[in-house]
Image: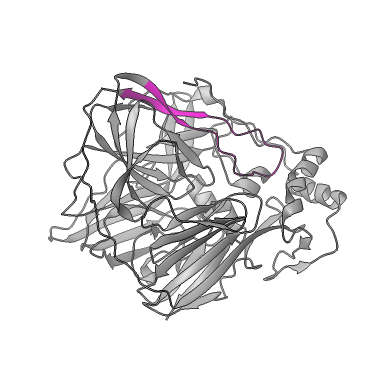
Amino acid sequence: MKRRIFLFNITAAISGLAVTKAFAKMDHFSMSDTMCAINSDECQKGDSMHHEHMNMNMNMSNNKTPQKLLATSALPQGQDLPELTRLKNTSDKQGTFEANLEAKPVKIKLTPELTTEFWAYNGNIPGPAIEAFEGDKVKITVKNSIPQATTVHWHGLLIPSNQDGNPQDEIPAGSSRTYEFTIPEGNAGTYWYHPHGHETVAEQVARGLAGIFIVRSKKDPLASLPEQNWFFSDLKLTDKGEIADNSMVDWMNGREGQFVLINGAYRPKITVKSATRVRIWNACSGRYLNLSIPNCDVYLVGTDGGLMPKPVQLNSPLLLSPAERAELVIVPKHSGTVYLQSIGYDRGKMGNVPPEQDIILGELALTESSPITLPSTLRELTKLGHATAHKTLEYTEVMDMKEPRGGMLFLINGKRHDMQRIDLESKIHEVEEWTIFNNSHMDHNFHIHGAQFTTVSHEVDGKKNPPKYEALKDTINLRPYEKITIKIQQNMPGLRMYHCHIIEHETLGMMGQLMVK
């Protein structure tokens, strides 16, 4: 058991030498000699990228004095894992969930000496937990009391596009809107909600706007098990206790704070007394979680889209990229206290950043439990059948001397996101195969709105492999130069977004728009 903590301040100024190291990694880019105008849709091949241009660009992006971050010892740790506040259902009608959410600034006292202003839903960090059942009619009125326009995206839920919080449907500051939708039958699962405004989502999530949304089934095969919710998020604070701005490295790689929180608590104590169902959210902006749960039998029973057909026992850490979720059944094999950790995972970051290391996330207080026999079948997944349409996406990264947020653009099919452009069209109910190619040196993931998909294959260096297990997903990771083929069907018309869910990369262009007709 490693008892070391490696939490680094990655906002230090990057020197010219570090710049050279950062962009040395870009030698393998298929578009490594590309330069883009900040407002361009497409990137045209340039002559070359000279180191003096790189250095100039990085210096321009890093012209502020680096922020000094709060020491990790400043926040209390070892407290009991908090229960998430539940959003009250104000409806007395059977099958109806009605409630109010307000996004607003709130000051929270983290220590007797330290008060931080967050942006929060109903004053809670994370936001209040929403629980509803398949088939329920949902009506949630959102009041926007933050100083920016915002939306609420109901991440993973299969709902109409005009209710899904697209960036085109922003709620102006000081205004309200009511989201109304019906949760489809068969949609039980582990979802969440967060902003999806244009150019604002990175700041709004970093300031605290996110919460969980659980859809329950009345025929849940695991309903007898006790449940816990582990909602992981990053918190990056200056030494003054303020929410830190994104550094250049944050924009390049995705924001990572010096504090990894679970249910808003830093390194909490988590008590597991028996076989327990645990729902897990990676709600971090850019951090990958590679979860190690020692001294337990760990079974993966659900993913983004709910329960899997059958449980899978895990014999290695569980990797969750940003926005991915999982449902586990944890069975303690021994009594005692161990560390819940994220094992270091190299995702190919740019810049002069330290090597990935193991991070302690919390303490697990375990009570030895008898082995458990899980149902051999948890769920039957609907087979989509033969695909009659095919789409191809290519992820690339390029330098942009005019982009002030890190000097990088992240592109899909050579284009950065444009709110005025429809990138792809699909026919409603048509079964499609999409192949997503991560033609870059670092991990990215793929998330799509309005549908869940199954994975057909993973391909690296021309070798195809089937997925390790069958599951419904809405977010999936791609290693460098990996191709993933998925099967998907859009069953409601309207505009849908697809993008990398490293939020900074989404903001810097790695997003497209699909029109379903």
x 50%, y 74%: residue: 390
Q: Name which residue lies at 70% across and 34% down.
A: 12
The spot of residue 215 in percent (x, y) is 26, 54
Residue 453 visible, this orientation: yes
Q: List the single residue furthest toward the front.
A: 463
In the picture provided, is 362 more to the left or to the right than 366? right
Residue 129, visible in the rendered structure: no
Residue 3 image position (x, y, % from top left): 49, 20
Instruction: Indicate whether 517 appears above or below 170.
Output: below
Colouring scheme applied when the structure was drawn: one colour
Q: Which residues are magenta?
A: 338-365
Name the foreground residue: 117 vs 292.
Answer: 292
Residue 516 relative to residue 398: left or right = left
As for residue 313 lying within the magenta part, the answer is no
* Residue 455 in which image quadrant: bottom left
The part of the image, by quadrant, that contains residue 398 is: bottom right
499 relative position to 280: left or right: right
